Amino acid sequence: GVRTRVGISECKNDKPGSESSPLCGICFCESPAHVGLPCRGHGYCEDCWSNYVSLAVEEGKGCLDLRCPAPKCRERLRPTQVRKLCVRPELVRRYDRFLLDSFVAE
């Protein structure tokens, strides 16, 4: 459907996925966290997700099209997910400013 074409899954539940690895797929340290992402987080820990999102917001407006870092996953992160995963309040404000600017520009 339309949701899939724009990178948003049709799945509405946030139950943990069936990831079999007991370790994070990025840092290989912590157990994967299920942080309420539609793509189920793909076996990455919450720290890695937070660092990924926070770095993207620090780097600029490209964070508005942020997608899951898993290979072959095109799931777009929603604004509520980005806000939840940002590690510092000033990054949430920066993201919200980018989001507002994008609406004004359109």
Image (spheres, rainbow, N blue to C red):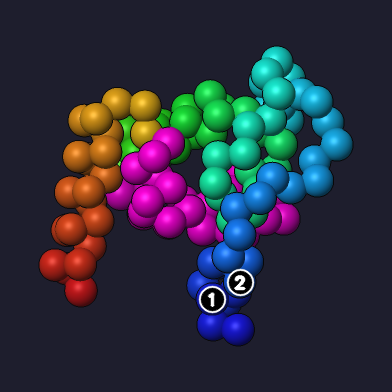
Q: Position of residue 34 (x, y in %)?
A: 62, 39
Nearer the N terminus, badge 2 or badge 1? Answer: 1
Q: Nearer the viewer, mark 2 or mark 1?
A: 2
Q: Quadrant of the N terminus?
A: bottom right
Residue at point 32%, 33% (across, down): 58
| Camera-side residue of 71 and 41 | 41
Q: Amino acid at mark 1?
A: Arg
Residue found at the far right of this picture: 20
Q: In the figure, is residue 20 to the left or right of 69?
A: right
Q: In the image, which residues are magenta?
A: 61-85
Which of the 4 image quadrants contains residue 104?
Answer: bottom left
Q: Residues within 10 Å of mark 2 (few under 14, many from 20)?
A: few
Residue at point 66%, 50% (across, down): 15
Residue that label 1 marks: 3
Residue 39 visible at all: yes
Mark 2 and mark 1 residues within 8 Å of each other at the beta carbon: yes
Mark sitting on residue 57: none
Q: CA distance from mark 2 to mark 1?
A: 6 Å
| Camera-side residue of 14 and 64 | 14
Which of the 4 image quadrants contains residue 4?
Answer: bottom right
Residue that label 2 marks: 10
